[in-house]
Image (cartoon, rainbow, N blue to C red):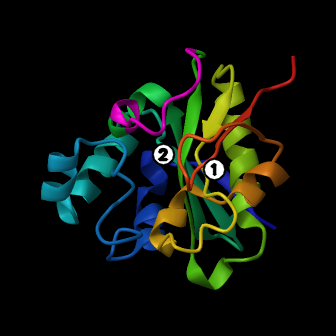
């Protein structure tokens, strides 16, 4: 059973534990979409860790942690679209309309806990978190099926199957490897 909680300052060390010394992947610390490329590259590792820590300390949780038996095993980055600076500048990941949205930009599950459905659980929890914060809709840009030529690191935005299982619907295909999917809370 997975329990999910917003990442608050009290949970920071648990996020560090989950991400490990590599910051989840190659020193990213889930800052790839939040920083301009130059700042991200210069901050790879420790500076990106400090940048994420600052977000956690700001009082606005930048995502959720999932726990099994009290141990952190999963992460989901969710925030209003406007907080992802590189997403806003992307030519291929633009929405087809101006509807305000919260965006799920990263899913990370500890290697020992993968393929157990935790991504779907994290996506559902992220939708509930965004809904409770007043989000009119949640969007994501998961990998299309059969994107075999895409390195696994790029699966960090999730797979289409996981989002469909969580109740999202496809809206657009902004690239050859990505699908824009959305979820709207019921009134």
Crowding at mark 1 (Cα within 10 Å: few <14, some 14-19, many 20+): some
In this view, which residue lies farthest toward the bottom? 112
The percent coordinates of residue 139 (x first, y second) are 63, 36
The residue under the point 48% across, 64% down is 154
Residue 123 as seen in the image, left or right of residue 96: right
Image quadrant containing the C terminus: top right
The percent coordinates of residue 146 (x first, y second) are 67, 68
Range drawn in magenta:
87-98
Snapshot quadrant of residue 33: top left
Which residue, given by chain and number where applicable, does mark 2 sit on? 8
Image quadrant containing the N terminus: bottom right
Crowding at mark 2 (Cα within 10 Å: few <14, some 14-19, many 20+): many
Q: Tell me if residue 149 comes above or below residue 126 in the rendering.
A: below
- Marker disc for residue 117: none
Q: Is residue 91 magenta?
A: yes
Q: Are marks 1 and 2 in contact (CB under 8 Å)?
A: yes
Q: Identify which residue, 105 or 122, lies in the foreground.
A: 105
The residue under the point 71% across, 74% down is 69
The percent coordinates of residue 95 (x first, y second) are 55, 27
Q: Is residue 2 magenta?
A: no
Which residue, given by chain and number where applicable, does mark 1 sit on? 5
Q: Identify which residue, 167 or 176, lies in the foreground.
A: 176
The percent coordinates of residue 101 (x first, y second) are 59, 25
Q: Secondary structure at mark 2?
A: loop
Snapshot quadrant of residue 117: bottom right
Q: Tell me if residue 47 comes above or below residue 125 in the rendering.
A: below
The residue under the point 35% across, 41% down is 55
């Amino acid at each position: 059973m997975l329990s999910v909680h917003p990442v608050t300052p009290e949970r920071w060390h648990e996020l560090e534990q989950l991400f490990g010394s590599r910051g989840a992947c190659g020193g990213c610390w889930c800052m790839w979409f939040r920083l301009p490329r130059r700042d991200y590259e210069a901050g790879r590792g420790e500076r990106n860790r400090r940048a994420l820590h600052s977000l956690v300390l700001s009082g606005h949780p930048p995502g959720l942690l999932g726990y099994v038996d009290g141990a952190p095993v999963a992460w989901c980055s969710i925030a209003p679209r406007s907080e992802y600076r590189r997403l806003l500048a992307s030519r291929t990941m633009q929405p087809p309309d101006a509807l305000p949205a919260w965006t799920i930009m990263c899913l990370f599950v500890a290697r020992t806990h993968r393929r157990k459905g935790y991504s779907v659980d994290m996506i559902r929890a992220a939708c509930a978190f965004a809904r409770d914060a007043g989000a009119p809709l949640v969007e994501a840009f998961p990998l299309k099926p059969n994107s075999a030529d895409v390195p696994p690191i790029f699966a960090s935005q999730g797979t289409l199957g996981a989002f469909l299982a969580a109740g999202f619907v496809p809206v657009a295909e902004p690239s050859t490897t990505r699908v824009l999917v959305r979820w709207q809370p019921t009134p």
